[in-house]
Image: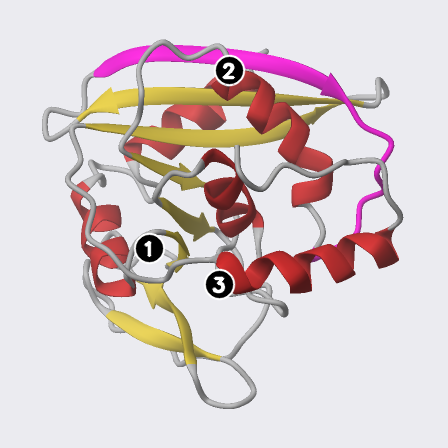
Amino acid sequence: MQFQHPWDMSPKEAVALQSKLAANVIAEGAPDVSFVAGVDVHPVSATGMMLAAVCVLSFPSLELVEQKTARVKTDFPYVPGLLSFREGPAVLAVFQKLKTHPDLVLFDGQGLAHPRRFGLASHMGLLLDLPSIGCAKSRLYGDCGEPGPHKGDLSYLLDKNREIIGACLRTRDNVKPLYVSVGHKINLDSAIWLTLAYITKYRQPEPLRLAHRMAKNR
């Protein structure tokens, strides 16, 4: 991995590292996807451990082809905007277990829709050198209007300079939207299109839904 870095640092040092590494994020590209991975990370109660689950699906069939989990101890505190420093080591550990090489990774978190344009999806996409998308259930940063009520309706998420940093995307009719943003090596239009392509009958894209279920049940 070209952008390896230590994980033992203070929140202040983590903010500085985010600002430095953000310049390396590539916000363009339209990956050709045969295998897509979904990643979710949960704390293991009262253990100081983070559990990362990854599910790899074939595309376009969306059949599960591989799933793995990994547990890694973390001492990094919970700080909004710095979650990748709690979750990142577990994500890297679980990817080392995979036999299937995904062409794209979906993260339950932010990408460019982040105060320093370097949320979990961007951070991990850069370290893994893989195209990635942030598909968050809640908004961390930026402003947007309410999208229309139907699947595929969206409004753009804007930063304080009114630059587009993501989209508030309706993935099912009359269901709460997701906040989709570029992670790494993909453009926003492709990120939106692919997110919708992985929706079945649930709000979350199928790779993320399966990873979330797996992480919660371990």
Look at the image and tell me whether residue 13 can be seen. yes
Question: Which residues are drawn in magenta?
Answer: 64-81
Look at the image and tell me whether residue 139 can be seen. no
Amino acid identity at mark 1: Val
Residue carrying label 3 = 112
Q: Secondary structure at mark 1?
A: loop
| Mark nearer the N terminus (2 vs 3) | 2
Residue carrying label 1 = 175
Gap in angstroms between the C-alphas marked 3 and 1: 24 Å
Residue carrying label 2 = 96
Q: Residue furthest left?
A: 60
Mark 1: give few (<14), some (14-19) or many (20+) Cα within 10 Å: few
Q: Residue furthest bottom?
A: 161
Q: Secondary structure at mark 3?
A: loop
Residue 18 in the image, given as x and y percentages of width and height = 67, 57
Residue 188 in the image, given as x and y percentages of width and height = 29, 63
Residue 97 in the image, given as x and y percentages of width and height = 48, 10
Instruction: Locate residue 152 relative to residue 70 in the image: left or right.
Output: left
Name the front one of labels 1 and 2. Answer: 2
At 60% across and 14% down in the image, what residue appears? 70
Name the front one of labels 3 and 1. Answer: 3
Q: Name the one closer to the observer, 15 or 2.
A: 2
At 66% across and 61% down in the image, what residue appears? 20
Amino acid identity at mark 2: Gln
